[in-house]
Amino acid sequence: MNTLAQQLLKNFDDLPETEQQAIAIEILKRAIDFDVPPLTDEDLVLNAEELFLALDEQETDDE
């Protein structure tokens, strides 16, 4: 990911939740036409693992 994309994500994170939701909807509308191959089972497992690790880290930080 280049610097511009990283800055966009940081700016997104700094927005109020309602603005984040509105922007996410607009991005999803634009991304729907991408020619993306279907996810493999391995892709799904890796993404789930990453998500659960992030949630575990967040729970640890909240304690």
Image (cartoon, rainbow, N blue to C red):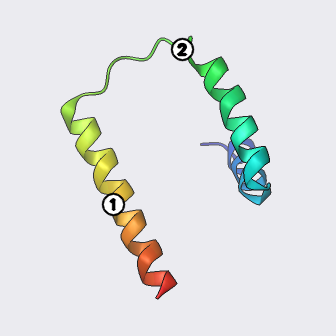
Residue designated by label 1:
52
Please give the label number shown on residue 25: none
Q: Secondary structure at mark 2?
A: loop
* Secondary structure of residue under mark 1: helix
Q: Position of residue 22 (x, y in %)?
A: 75, 37
Residue sitting at 23 percent across and 44 percent down?
45
Given residues 3 and 37, the one toward you in this image is 37
Q: Nearer the viewer, mark 2 or mark 1?
A: 1
> Residue lying farthest front?
18
Q: Nearer the viewer, residue 1 or 58?
A: 58
When asked about the image quadrant of residue 32, the answer is: top right
Q: Residue at x 65, y 20 (%)?
A: 29
Q: Is residue 8 visible?
A: no
- Mark 2 vs mark 1, CA separation in Å: 27 Å
Reading the image, the residue beneath label 2 is 34
Quadrant showing the N terminus: top right
Q: Quadrant of residue 39?
A: top left
In the picture, measured across the screen, residue 13 lies left or right of residue 52, that is: right
Task: Tell me if mark 1 has few (under 14), some (14-19) or many (20+) residues whose alpha carbon lies within 10 angstroms of its own.
Answer: few
Tag 2 and tag 1, C-beta contact below 8 Å: no
